[in-house]
Amino acid sequence: MSISLTLRRLAILGIPALVIAFSFLLFEGKTQQIVLGMMSGAQSLAGLSALIVGALALDVALPVPSSVVNVTAGTVLGVAGGTLTCWLGMTLSCLLGYWIGATGGTSALRRLLGAEELARSTRMSNRFAFGSLLLLRAVPVLAETSTIAAGIARLPLRRFLGVVALANLGIAAAYATLGAMAVEADSFLLAFCAALALPVAGLGGRLIYAQMRPESQPLSGTLAMAEAPDPTPITRPALRPTAPPQGTSVLQRFSVDYSYRVVFTRGLFAPGNDTLGEVFREASDGRAQRCLVFVDADMLRQRPALADEITACFDRLGTEATLATAPRPITGGEDIKAGFEQVFEIYRLILRHRIDRHCYVMAIGGGAVLDAVGMATATAHRGIRHIRVPTTVLSQNDSGVGVKNAVNFEGSKNFAGSFAPPWAVLNDFDMLETLPPAIRRAGISEAVKVALIRDPEFFLWLETNAEALRRFEPAAEEYMIRRSAELHMHQIAHGGDPFERGSARPLDFGHWSAHKLEGLTHYAVSHGDAVAMGIALDTRYSVLAGLLPEGGEERVLALLQALDLPVWHPALEQRDAGGQLEILNGLEEFREHLGGELTVTLLLGLGTGVEMHEMKPELVAEALGWLAAQGQD
């Protein structure tokens, strides 16, 4: 799973630019003949003006020889008439490009990049958009592309129109003046050269500016993760006592590609299954690789032979990998995340067994075990290779395939944590067989969540196969886990914010109230069940807010109930001393955890999420009332 944010963001400009460029290459000659033929056949100046305006307006979609048309306008209509005519045509072309981007372009790129990546790319575009529009107005292909990109980014129309109108006026006046000069000189060659002059001057000016930029301006660079030749020796100036330079800065920028294997299998440690061997061989340097293994103590109680199976598996690996010590039992559930005690104990074992950055730490357990062990491995030696073996439905279809880890602190869920992609994730479906039915079923809520915000077809599949999922039929359960994991991984890799530096968290749909509900019940309600109730609450709120069509919440509620997932808990209507619903405090706690502006994912459709920055308390209360009535039926 390789993350390449820069390339995906360039798609916003690159795709329209390629379409326009190919259009010019394939049809420019034919279009030029048609346009010039129509102009030469015009019977009046008014007719010619209309043709010029129409041709320039269509330049954003057709390979119109706009430079030649502009100069011809000046030649025939004079400076004033040519300027006005060209300005009107070019400005209409900009508006048409904006409309194309704001309608078809946005939906097409949403399918290509994903809604979150598109939103992040458009936020980036907004920072530089107006300067880019000015710089690109005289550059062929990029001029048209920039107007389409402006529509995709939904720049404010009034400001967009003001910028392009002013830029177009200068270009139109220049072309019309050069065209009029060509009439006086009676030189077609001069008129043709005038058509090319401004684009060449624009590009040349940018190159000259880049060469002449003062050293005091910020520098930007890219550090490539590859070997490079030795740099040319630099002669250092003699040191002398001088005041430090003012206003000098160096901007360092680099990117690192992450990739890790996610495997779906059965009998991970059984003879004949070489999954673990393949993982170790990927980074083998010929030396035996050491691995420290932690196993959820409850899993060992349910499967007493598991420790021996793990030991036998490593024995079969021989010199490829060895156990640092016998598999270590570790407390599971939220208790392991209640502060740093267990993290410190993992540190001690890492030190005792001399586990370094080229060794491995394997965690076998549910989401809480993966969180705590992941937190320890991410911070010990600034990062040790971490192999996850999720043992619950929820960790196999969601948390275990992600890049986060965390522990709780002072009652705040996931307060301390880090972003650390695992070395590998090995999903063994056989591990699910020992789970209590309620815990096994609770993990399906994360599949419902990701289907609701990203995949309408998967939501339909869940509706159709709810009974099979409720009975844990292997084929249905395995597909549900795989598809949910794929959607979560796609969002992380292509959503534009894998390390959550922004404020949006699409994968936390239904979670603002779920996290608060877990705390209110002192974690008596499992995370999966809390998410199911959070989904129901936010879906009904989406209807009340006018986002989701009426009836959508009924389908979601019916699916949750068909899966035997809870939709109501009395703690949801618990109030504080001031009479306010306690659950509403979860919104501010959620905002603090995200940072920045409150951003909550709601629903536009069953399969389409939308980011909102406000939830009205009265609508939350109304949604809770509806949910209470449904849950008590």
Image (cartoon, rainbow, N blue to C red):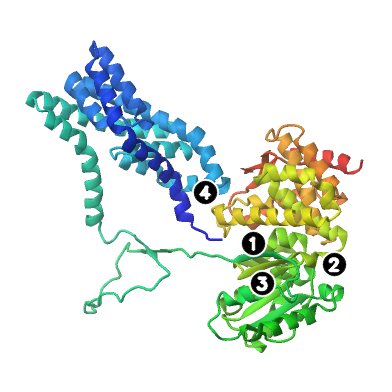
Disc 4 versus disc 3: distance between alpha carbons? 37 Å
Of labels 2 and 4, the one closer to you: 2
Q: Which residue is mark 4?
A: 120
Check disc 4: other Cα within 10 Å, few if <14, some if 14-19, many if 20+.
some
Check disc 2: other Cα within 10 Å, few if <14, some if 14-19, many if 20+.
some
Q: Give coordinates of residue 181: x percent, y percent.
A: 12, 27
The numbered disc on residue 434 is 2
Q: Residue at x 22, y 19 (%)?
A: 81
Q: Give left or right: position of 239 versus 534.
A: left
Q: Residue at x 42, y 36 (%)?
A: 148
Q: Look at the numbered discs 3 and 2 and tell me whether their residues touch, using CB distance below 8 Å.
A: no
First along the sequence among labels 1 and 4: 4
Q: Look at the numbered discs 2 and 4 and tell me whether their residues touch, using CB distance below 8 Å.
A: no
Q: Give coordinates of residue 139: x percent, y percent.
A: 29, 40
First along the sequence among labels 4 and 3: 4
Q: Give coordinates of residue 327: x percent, y percent.
A: 75, 82
